Amino acid sequence: MKVLFLPEVVDQFLELAEILYDKGYLGFKDAALDYSEQLFRDI
């Protein structure tokens, strides 16, 4: 099965990584990006 995303959805996942880092949920920006990317892949 193939899932297609609008470019806006990809931007929201990048924004999620910024929010997770800025709010202190994840201590490193790389960890926040990795988490967001893994969540994107899981969907």
Image (cartoon, rainbow, N blue to C red):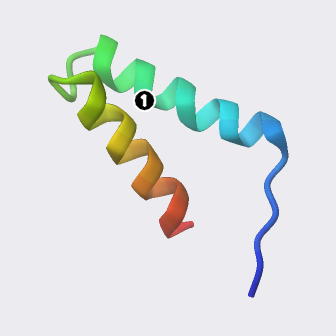
Q: Quadrant of the C terminus?
A: bottom right
**Residue lying furthest front:** 30
Residue 12 percent across, percent down from the top left: 64, 32
**Which quadrant is the N terminus positioned in?**
bottom right
What residue is at 32 percent from the left and 33 percent from the top?
A: 32
Amino acid on which disc 1 is placed: Ala
The residue sitting at 76% across, 71% down in the picture is: 3
Q: Position of residue 11 (x, y in %)?
A: 68, 31
Looking at this view, name the residue that lies furthest to the left: 27
Query: Image quarter for residue 23?
Result: top left
Horizontally, residue 29 falls left or right of residue 18, namely left
Relative image position of residue 33 (x, y in whole percent): 38, 35
Residue identified by numbered label 1:
17
Alpha-carbon neighbours of circle 1 within 10 Å: few (<14), some, or many (≥20)? many
- Tell me if residue 18 comes above or below residue 13 in the rendering: above
Q: Residue at x 82, y 63 (%)?
A: 4
- The residue at the far bottom in this view is 1
Residue 19 drawn at (x, y percent): 41, 20
Report whether 37 appears left or right of 12: left
Q: 6 left or right of 18? A: right
Task: Residue 22: name its quadrant.
Answer: top left
